[in-house]
């Protein structure tokens, strides 16, 4: 009986050690995105592409896409598929939000209508792709929801730097999305530390 | 000398005729779409126009608010104004000049309009009598307009537009509107916001639908209708006419006038009123004996009320209604009435007829308006009655006595349907009933009708292709076998862009 108890404890401790070791192996991907023929390296989405046989639960957090001073803020919002985005109108003028397609698929178009200042309207984005946000009253307004398949993503700063944290060790495909550039794909291997992946986005 | 005076009257009549013809066939609206505001606020033309220059609900609210956003204007301005004194200087007033501001960049916009004309074939006799008119003509009237508008701080706003050239290279256009407006004067009398505003300068009357803001290629016929007594003007040269009516009123409702206007748009802009005191347009016509300048002022009154039919209270009270696909104009019916009273003065000191006193011919124009908006459909119309007092001159007897008034009626009905936000089908019906015009052989019958189906294509928010076919009334012309008639129908299509 005593031996059995010792064996169970040993298994539990071993499991815990293995788990901690696994967690310790989660790394990060850092790098810099350079651009060719594009004005700025800011607001480029960098994300880990779909991982075979790996599914992720939809996040519960609801990021906000605001409409303020007749501008979609932020200009680009990257979310994991299954995320509900809340659209806020902070302006005292009427706006609406619609997207004619998601990555060209017009069946996935959406139009959320109109709502007054201070109120939000949510929409769950289940399909991977890019929704170009528009307002049919103010055609100069434009924003993007980039829906990616994994929770491992980042948006470049004004210098093109990005950092994706808590990426489990493994080999992945890194992809980019840019408003004015072509998609860039690059393989990356993440270990226990920081993996560096510099990318170039061309027009 | 007397002959010259009589001929002057004939010349004045001809001038009136020419003005009418010009209004009907040549005039296109002067520019009223303002890219300078797009630059100031960093927004598209479609924010204020569904089909420029016609204003949508937001554009109307923007205009009525002195060219400022109805709420939190400062937060939307992308081009900061230059302050003419700090705001704190208000406290120092009257010890200092009250602070104001001017636009940060020169608020100038430009508009070009040119059309392809395809005219009905003219009868040979008409060509012989009146000269050849080509079947086709390119880029008429070739109008280039400069527009400047903006605000000078919270209350003052301004507008100036001028057709720099019209009808061809180097040809003069003319000043359209040029006014300064003070918004919310009623604030000092504890009246609701914008219940009392005032503007000074030259402006188109606060008409419900104006030739300046029409999106069509031709003006509304009734707004270009003048008044002319029945029968030929007196003349001592063959064919001699010794008895004639004095009414020869070139007044046209759609022409900008110099004056002062009080007005307001309280109750969310549903109620609109204005009262203007103006010089009258006949001051601009004639020189020498035909001079019709005068000292009296004309009065124009206009009021209208919009019944907002939106069911949702939030939409009803909003600047625009909320719809499932975005904000839109309110579903609404606006009804209103307007009245103009003026005096047409002629024969100052007997200069026109060689005898008699100054002739005062009071006249009025009274009309009503209706406008209905529902989603992509817009219907509106105007009915107008014109009445000019008239005198009968007998040049042989040397008498001038009152006689029957000259009257006319007319109006227009318009339907616009937005097939897409960029493609609008239009239909207009214009009608004018003027027995004088028929008797004077300007037109075949008392009533002349015009049907004008058309289209408007917004190639971009600031570039339009506009077209309309005008099926016109019978116009008389002399031939060897007597008076014949033909329809000077015309198809017009052209480009219109602003920047």
Image (tube, coloured by chain):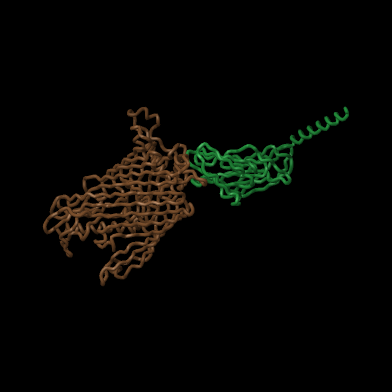
Chain colours: A green, B brown
**At 49% across and 46% down in the image, what residue appears?**
A137
**Residue B418 at what x, y percent from top left?**
46, 53
Please state, as top left, top right, bottom left or bottom right, where the N terminus of chain B lies in the image. bottom left
Question: In the displayed structure, would residue A121 be above or below residue B223?
Answer: above
**Residue B114 at what x, y percent from top left?**
39, 57
Question: In the displayed structure, would residue B89 be above or below residue B246?
Answer: above
Count the labels in the image.
0
Which residue is most to the left?
A: B397
Residue A146 location, quadrant: top right
Instruction: Identify which residue, B381 or B283, lies in the foreground.
Output: B381
Horizontal placement of B161 versus A185: left or right?
A: left
Question: In the displayed structure, would residue B191 be above or below residue B343?
Answer: above
**Residue B397 at what x, y percent from top left?**
11, 57
Residue A148 location, quadrant: top right
Instruction: Identify which residue, B250 or B291, lies in the foreground.
Output: B250
**Residue A116 at what x, y percent from top left?**
50, 39
Horizontal placement of A170 versus B297: left or right?
A: right
Instruction: Identify which residue, B63 or B499, lies in the foreground.
Output: B63
Q: Is residue B339 visible?
A: yes
Q: Is residue A158 visible?
A: no
């Amino acid at each position: 009986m005593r031996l059995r108890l010792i064996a169970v404890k040993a298994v539990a401790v071993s499991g815990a050690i293995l788990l901690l070791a696994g967690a310790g192996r989660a790394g990060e991907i850092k790098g810099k995105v350079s651009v060719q023929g594009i004005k700025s390296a800011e607001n480029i989405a960098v994300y880990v592409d779909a991982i075979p046989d790996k599914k992720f639960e939809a996040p519960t957090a609801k990021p906000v896409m605001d409409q303020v001073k007749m501008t979609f803020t932020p200009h680009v919002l990257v979310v994991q598929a299954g995320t509900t985005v809340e659209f806020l109108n902070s302006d005292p003028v009427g706006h609406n939000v619609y997207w004619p397609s998601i990555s060209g698929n017009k069946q996935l178009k959406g139009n959320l209508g109109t709502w007054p200042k201070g109120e939000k309207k949510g929409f769950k984005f289940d399909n991977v792709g890019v929704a170009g946000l528009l307002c049919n009253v103010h055609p100069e307004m434009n924003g993007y929801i980039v829906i990616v398949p994994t929770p491992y993503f980042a948006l470049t700063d004004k210098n093109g730097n990005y950092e994706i944290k808590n990426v489990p060790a493994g080999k992945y495909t890194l992809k980019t999305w840019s408003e004015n550039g072509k998609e860039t794909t690059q393989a990356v291997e993440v270990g226990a530390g920081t993996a560096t992946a510099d990318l170039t986005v061309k027009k | 000398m007397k002959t010259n005076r009589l001929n002057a009257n004939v010349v004045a009549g001809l001038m009136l005729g020419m003005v009418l013809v010009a209004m009907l066939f040549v005039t296109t609206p002067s520019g009223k779409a303002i890219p300078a505001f797009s630059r100031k606020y960093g927004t598209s033309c479609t924010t204020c126009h569904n089909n420029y220059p016609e204003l949508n609900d937001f554009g109307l609210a923007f205009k009525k608010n002195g060219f400022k956003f109805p709420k939190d204007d400062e937060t939307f301005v992308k081009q900061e104004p230059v302050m003419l004194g700090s705001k704190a200087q208000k406290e120092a007033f009257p010890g200092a000049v009250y602070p104001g501001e001017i636009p940060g960049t020169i608020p100038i916009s430009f508009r070009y309009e040119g059309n392809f004309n395809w005219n009905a074939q003219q009868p040979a006799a008409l060509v012989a009598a009146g000269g050849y008119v080509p079947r086709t003509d390119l880029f008429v009237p070739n109008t280039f307009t400069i527009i400047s508008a903006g605000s000078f701080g919270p209350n003052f706003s301004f507008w100036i537009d001028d057709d720099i050239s019209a009808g061809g290279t180097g040809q003069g256009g003319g000043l359209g509107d040029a006014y300064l407006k003070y918004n919310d004067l009623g604030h000092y009398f504890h009246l609701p916001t914008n219940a009392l505003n005032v503007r000074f300068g030259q402006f188109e009357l606060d008409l419900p639908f104006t030739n300046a803001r029409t999106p069509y290629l031709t003006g509304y016929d009734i707004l270009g209708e003048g008044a002319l007594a029945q029968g030929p003007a007196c003349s001592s040269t063959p064919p001699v006419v010794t008895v004639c009516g004095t009414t020869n009123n070139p007044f046209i409702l759609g022409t900008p006038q110099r004056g002062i206007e009080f007005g307001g748009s309280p109750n969310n802009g549903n109620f609109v009123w204005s009262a203007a005191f103006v010089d009258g347009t006949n001051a601009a016509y004639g020189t020498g004996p035909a001079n019709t300048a005068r000292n009296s002022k004309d009065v124009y009154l206009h009021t209208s009320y919009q019944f907002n039919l939106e069911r949702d209270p939030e939409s009803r009270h909003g600047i625009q209604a909320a719809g499932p696909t975005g904000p839109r104009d309110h579903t609404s019916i606006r009804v209103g009435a307007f009245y103009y009273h003026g005096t047409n003065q002629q024969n100052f000191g007997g200069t026109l007829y060689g005898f008699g006193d100054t002739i005062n011919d009071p006249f009025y124009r009274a009309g009503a308006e209706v406008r209905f908006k529902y989603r992509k459909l817009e219907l509106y119309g105007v009915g107008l009655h014109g009445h000019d007092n008239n005198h009968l001159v007998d040049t042989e007897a040397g008498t001038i006595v009152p006689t029957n008034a000259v009257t006319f009626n007319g109006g227009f009905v318009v339907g616009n349907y937005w097939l897409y936000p960029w493609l609008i089908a239009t239909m207009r019906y214009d009608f004018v009933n003027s027995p004088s015009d028929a008797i004077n052989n300007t037109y075949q019958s008392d009533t002349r009708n015009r049907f004008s189906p058309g289209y408007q294509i917004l190639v971009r928010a600031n570039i339009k292709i506009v077209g309309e076919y005008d099926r016109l009334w019978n116009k008389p012309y002399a031939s060897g076998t007597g008076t014949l008639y033909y329809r000077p129908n015309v198809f017009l299509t052209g480009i219109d862009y602003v920047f």
